[in-house]
């Protein structure tokens, strides 16, 4: 027994003596697992310090994305932030030798994330953010008001909710705001129309309120408020935008009252659509001063009286839609437009024309008298009138060519 014990001890002693020499051999045998080597972190080199600061912000946002059907975020790796898909760099205004993240374009990426808070509001050099047709949600952080260079903000066709993002009221440089096709509710602050906005797209939300009385205070070119629940009359202040306002969409709301005489002062207006509301009264003759108007749509309202000949004499008209109202008279200029297909008066109360309402329906409407304020102004024409009806151009422009009509489609087409 003692011999066996001594032999075992000898073998053990010999094993430990040979262990330093056996380790290199054992380490080359793949069948014997070895502890993993410690990872050496990759050392990133950035083109500019500003990019190194926003790198962790982008990587943190990347971890919040729950759906990425086009594998966009697979490109968001490494130190070359400017090569990430959807990210664009430029020289910031405060240092033309520096390189910074200036623009983000996520249009059509269909990314899903529960919020944008902690992302765009932490990108100090951001000037443009476009994110049409994604699945971003939540509310808009007030911190975006601190971004000094942001002038275009497009959050359209997402799942944002809550009240109007009042943070934009503090963004003095903002000129383009597109929040259409979301679930914003409540009122639009009148202060929005004191902003220096050129483009304001609010259509297809759930805004419920009277149109702000200062509607024309902003130097807007394009305004879409369609497909909401705006109420009340069109403010007379719209004339204050006479030098800029080019296209206006107010269709499919709950507007009431009479058309303001001041509409005729919008000398740059090419498109005005207030179809499918509850507007009433006669058409003001001042509409004959809209020298550049191409499309005027007032279909589906409660308008009545004679269609002004000065309106039908405008040579720029391509589409004048007055169907499904209660007009009773048209003159020779208007009849010429009906014949050419420019003017649609179907579903009215005009004797002798096909496709009109029944006598009973018209009589029922006129049995309830309606009145407009400032009725004396409706026959006043605040401009010189030239007969241009003989110069009507052929209808070469369609609704689809108008900027604001494109906003009625969810996906960005501009």
Image (cartoon, rainbow, N blue to C red):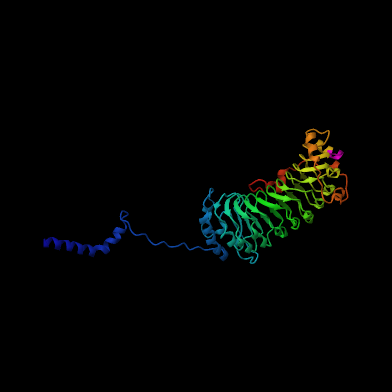
Q: Position of residue 304 (x, y in %)?
A: 81, 42
Residue at image x 64%, y 57%?
165
- Residue 80 quadrant: bottom right
- Residue 176 quadrant: bottom right
Asked whether 356 falls inside the magenta stretch, the response is no
Residue 174 in view (yes/no): yes
Tell which residue pokes out farthest to the front in this image. Answer: 367
Q: Position of residue 386 (x, y in %)?
A: 88, 46
Horizontal relation, residue 194 to residue 141: left or right:
right
Residue at image x 81%, y 45%?
370
Horizontal relation, residue 38 to residue 284: left or right:
left
The residue lying toward the viewer, choosing from 92 and 207, is 207
Position of 189 relative to 357 (above/below): below
Q: Position of residue 345 (x, y in %)?
A: 79, 38
The residue lying toward the viewer, choosing from 145 and 36, is 145
Horizontal relation, residue 8 to residue 121: left or right:
left
Horizontal relation, residue 92 to residue 213: left or right:
left
Question: Which residue range is magenta in the image?
Answer: 329-334
The residue lying toward the viewer, choosing from 119 and 234, is 234
Q: Position of residue 6 (x, y in %)?
A: 14, 63
Residue 130 in view (yes/no): no
Indicate the quadrant containing the N terminus: top left, top right, bottom left or bottom right.
Answer: bottom left
Residue at image x 65%, y 62%?
149
């Amino acid at each position: 027994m003692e011999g066996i014990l001594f032999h075992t001890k000898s073998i053990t002693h010999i094993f430990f003596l040979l262990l330093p020499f056996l380790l290199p051999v054992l380490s080359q045998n793949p069948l014997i697992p070895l502890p993993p080597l410690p990872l050496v972190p990759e050392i990133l080199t950035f083109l500019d310090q500003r990019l190194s600061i926003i790198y962790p912000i982008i990587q943190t946002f990347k971890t919040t994305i729950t759906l990425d059907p086009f594998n966009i975020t697979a490109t968001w790796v490494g130190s070359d932030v400017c090569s990430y898909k959807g990210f664009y760099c430029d020289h910031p205004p405060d240092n033309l030798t520096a390189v910074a993240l200036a623009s983000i374009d996520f249009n059509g990426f269909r990314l899903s994330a529960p919020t944008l808070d902690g992302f765009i509001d932490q990108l100090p050099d951001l000037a443009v953010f476009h994110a049409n047709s994604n699945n971003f949600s939540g509310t808009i952080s007030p911190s975006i008001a601190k971004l000094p260079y942001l002038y275009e903000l497009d959050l359209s066709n997402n799942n944002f909710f809550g009240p109007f993002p009042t943070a934009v009221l503090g963004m003095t440089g903002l000129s383009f705001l597109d929040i259409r096709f979301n679930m914003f509710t409540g009122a639009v602050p009148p202060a929005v129309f004191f902003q220096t906005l050129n483009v304001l797209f609010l259509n297809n939300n759930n805004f419920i309120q009277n149109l702000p009385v200062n509607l024309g205070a902003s130097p807007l070119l394009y305004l879409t408020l369609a497909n909401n629940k705006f109420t009340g009359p069109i403010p007379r202040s719209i004339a204050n935008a006479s030098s800029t306002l080019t296209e206006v969409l107010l269709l499919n709301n709950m507007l009431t009252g009479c058309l303001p005489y001041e509409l005729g002062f919008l000398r740059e207006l090419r498109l005005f659509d207030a179809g499918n509301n509850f507007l009433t009264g006669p058409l003001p003759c001042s509409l004959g001063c809209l020298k550049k108007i191409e499309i005027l749509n007032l279909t589906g309202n409660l308008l009545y009286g004679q269609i002004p000949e000065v309106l039908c004499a405008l040579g720029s008209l391509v589409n004048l839609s007055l169907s499904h109202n209660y007009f009773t008279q048209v003159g020779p200029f208007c009849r010429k437009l009906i014949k050419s297909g420019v003017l649609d008066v179907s579903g009215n109360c005009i004797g002798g024309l096909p496709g009109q309402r029944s006598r009973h329906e018209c009589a029922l409407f006129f049995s309830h008298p309606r009145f407009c304020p400032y009725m004396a102004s409706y026959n006043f024409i605040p401009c010189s009138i030239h007969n241009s009806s003989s110069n009507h151009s052929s209808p070469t422009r369609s609704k689809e060519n108008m900027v604001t009509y494109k906003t009625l489609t969810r996906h960005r087409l501009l």
